[in-house]
Image (spheres, rainbow, N blue to C red):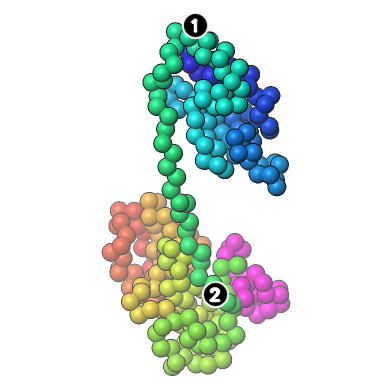
Amino acid sequence: MSMITDSKFLGLLSPKLEKFKQVRDHLWNFRCPLCGDSRRNRSKARGYVYRKKSDLFYKCHNCGSGLSIGNFIKEIDPTLHKHYVMERYKAGETGKRKTKEPDFKFESPKFKPKKTPIHLPSISSLPKEHYARFYYEAREIPNHFMDKIFYAEDFKKWAQSVCQVDYSTLMSGEPRLVIPFFDKDNQLIGAQGRALRESKIRYVTVKVDEKLQKIFGLERWNPEEHTYLVEGPIDSLFLPNCLAIGGADLKNNNFLDKSKTTLIFD
């Protein structure tokens, strides 16, 4: 019965609540009349009335006020509050609620770290006639990866700028397609460079740190779903939930659930 009474008197109070609207069942939104919400932005509405068990409560996400609906009505319209108390009394409801006013505990939001910047032009940013983009399109790699694969005019110079491992023996001035490897936290762990001109070594895979594994696709991998495991990063882009063991043995996959993993050999 208290929900009916609470909802009725919230409706009666609504003409005094700026930008009042019902968002969905048992959830209403309006500008906070206690703090005035934002003075600079009149469109902001951060006051909410919501259901908890069999009662309604008010919460402002600007000033932090938290009240039972009865106390909220009392703050805004003491006369209406008297009628509210009387109606609850007639309905056989005492002034004491079974549901105590909740403690509001807000944890700081946790965000996934931003990807390590690559500081190279992506394939999508290159002109259509550029030979790196021509190679990408000729391989028919899905277009939605075009901004995740890059071009380096001098792969050795770029590798030495991001890796702690010494790659001074790499050939200087070689242009390569750069396929970065990220871990689950979007941090760069390595990269593969695919030669775009005549080269003795077609693929070069580098690591940021010697301790890190060369696994491609971790940042978009879902371990709860069936996993495909291939050797080449480019090959992995054609399969769903696929990882690539860059330059390593496919059998080195102890981190995977073998019952939900398919190995695909070249």
Q: Is residue 79 above or below residue 16?
A: above
User: Crowding near pointer 2: few (<14 within 10 Å), some, many (20+)?
Assistant: some
**How far across and how far down the image is residue 162, in percent?**
48, 81
Is 231 displayed left or right of 7 in the figure?
left
Residue lying at the far top in this picture: please name it.
90
| Quadrant position of residue 137 | bottom right
Q: Residue at x 39, y 57 (%)?
A: 227
Would you say the residues marked 1 and 2 are in contact, meaning their CB atoms lie under 8 Å apart? no
Which residue was labeled with disc 1?
A: 90
Q: Is residue 159 above or below residue 98?
A: below
Mark seen at residue 118: 2
Magenta highlight on residue 102: no
Q: Which tag, 1 or 2, sits closer to the chain's start?
A: 1
Residue lying at the far front in this picture: please name it.
78
Is 218 displayed left or right of 154 in the figure?
left
Magenta segment, which residues? 121-145
| Quadrant position of residue 103 | top left
Identify the amino acid type marked 1. Lys
